[in-house]
Image: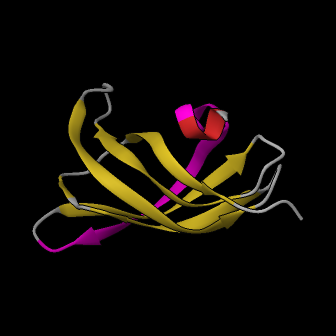
Amino acid sequence: AIFQTNPSALLQAAAWQVEKEAGNYTRVTTISWTNRSNIGVADLEGEFSYLDGNGAVMATVPFTAEGEIGPGETKALKVYVAAVAGTPMRMHVQVEMVRVLPAQ
């Protein structure tokens, strides 16, 4: 039930990979997630914030992440998110929706 009301409480974003684009733009391409629950999930969606070195929000944009994360698993998923001008130093991710996988 918590995955329906607050999936971010059970999914922790850790390492992220970025890709530099023309015109001094940066895009996140992969995020490593830890699923702190005993339920498998897939198809994460929510909001992604790029932050500067002082923690100020540079941009907040929707994201989707493709793939599955099993119970207790840490896994890198490809994410689809808009690029931001500049070089973000940190990120904040708010997962708003997931698909719960059937129990194995």
* Residue at the image position 48 percent from the left and 63 percent from the top: 65
Q: Is 70 left, or right, of 80 in this rendering? A: right
The picture places residue 92, in percent across and down from the top left corner, at 42, 37
Q: Quadrant of residue 8?
A: top right
Front-lying residue, 103 or 53: 103
Q: Quadrant of residue 70?
A: bottom right
In magenta segment, residue 18: yes
* Residue at the image position 54 percent from the left and 32 percent from the top: 5
The picture places residue 99, in percent across and down from the top left corner, at 59, 58
* Residue at the image position 25 percent from the left and 49 percent from the top: 61
Q: Is 103 left, or right, of 27 in this rendering? A: right
Q: Quadrant of the C terminus?
A: bottom right
Front-lying residue, 41 or 81: 41
- Please say if 20 is above or below 15: below
Front-lying residue, 101 or 92: 101
Q: Outermost residue, bottom direction?
A: 22
**What type of secondary structure mainly makes up the magenta span?**
strand
Q: Outermost residue, left direction?
A: 23
The picture places residue 49, in percent across and down from the top left corner, at 32, 41
Q: Quadrant of residue 10?
A: top right
Colouring method of the image: secondary structure
Q: Quadrant of the N terminus?
A: top right
The picture places residue 18, in percent across and down from the top left corner, at 40, 63
Q: Is 84 left, or right, of 38 in this rendering? A: left
Count of numbered labels shown in the rendering = 0
In magenta segment, residue 6: yes
Report the span colored magenta.
Answer: 5-22
Q: Outermost residue, right direction?
A: 104
* Residue at the image position 30 percent from the left and 43 percent from the top: 50
